[in-house]
Amino acid sequence: MEPGCYTALITPFDQAGTLDSEGLEQLINFQIENAITGILATGTTGESPTLEWEEHNNIIAQVARYAKNKCLTIAGTGSNNTQEALQATGLAARTGIDAVLLVDPYYNGPSSLEIRKEYHEVIARQYPDLSVIPYIIPGRVGAQMFPQDLAILAENCKNVSCVKEATGNLENMKLTRKLCGPDFKILSGDDALVFAIMSDPDIMACGGISVMSNIAPKFLSQMIELLNQGKTDEALKFQNKIKPLLDLVVVITQEDSKFGPVTCRARNPLPVKTLMQLLGMPSGPCRQPLGKMTRKGFKVLLDTAKHIQENAPEIFQPIADFFNVDIEKRLNDTTLHKNLWYSY
């Protein structure tokens, strides 16, 4: 895989919860027009846990078809069942996809050794001509392949030369760099850490697989390109402008329930899909059990979007141009907001 900015693409649905194929094509073209390095289909941001396999394969095929020779393409084919992941990887490979992303197996809790031997190595050896990207996110899956096993995996399987790092643990990333060597590619899986880990000489990440590049692919691509060119001061100007948006991947609020205060955590992809609906992009609602943000959570999104529009309108301008929407109207017409949140 190349250094750069990859978008973990959302899956757009209509209001009935059916896949919006036309909207998906528009989103792919929007990404390509704004110079994205690559597109990841059917990741967590794409709501892969709620997709039927026919939908899953259809989305990957569409991304492969529309993006071929225009940007790199990645398919999320991971599972907590190695045989299921093998089958999904095989189907993705036949579409001509460039790489697959394999999340560490969730819930059944294999050890780091088992994740390497009974999962990643099995799949990587079965498809030696396909780039395989381990996705390390213990906060989601409850298990982790550690840097030691990642380094062994990279030695044993030459098609593993990259990792999506979403541990949030800088020491883990530093150990990955130390054990895997200078040529191994580390992509950030956490928007809020992209700048930090790309500019850290002990980590040397070369890009990210981003959630908020669904909304700002051009701006994030430019920032990551500057960082890869060693122009840290210039990149910092981009980082300072877009940081409020990157902090919206997860929105935490304190809500008042009938029986007392409750912490409400709106996790990805709920905030980004809500923001995309707000801005007039193809998105639609999330699938159950994800629902809507609370009114307080929505206000956090709205206030941040207004702040960005006022202080860095160039971030949203590509959306206005491509989707022919009036950003100011979308942010200030409250009649457009009423179905985007619900009360506790």
Image: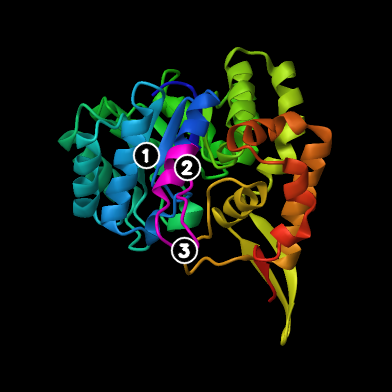
Query: Which residue is disc 3 drawn over?
Result: 287
Q: Which mark is residue 9?
A: 2
- Quadrant assignment, res 123: top left
Identify the disc placed on residue 30.
Answer: none
Helix, strand or loop at mark 1: strand
The amino acid marked with disc number 2 is Leu
Q: Where is 276 relative to 159, above or below?
A: below
Whole-percent x and y of residue 32? Answer: 48, 27
Q: Where is residue 69? Give x, y as percent.
A: 35, 21
Q: Amino acid at mark 1?
A: Pro
Report the magenta residues as a range: 8-27
Q: Is residue 292 above or below residue 39?
A: below
Please report contact status of discs 1 and 3: CB closer than 8 Å, yes or no: no
Between circles 1 and 2, the one closer to the viewer is: 2
SS type, badge 2: loop
Q: Are marks 1 and 2 in contact (CB under 8 Å)?
A: no
Q: CA distance from mark 3 to mark 2?
A: 15 Å
Q: CA distance from mark 1 to mark 3?
A: 26 Å
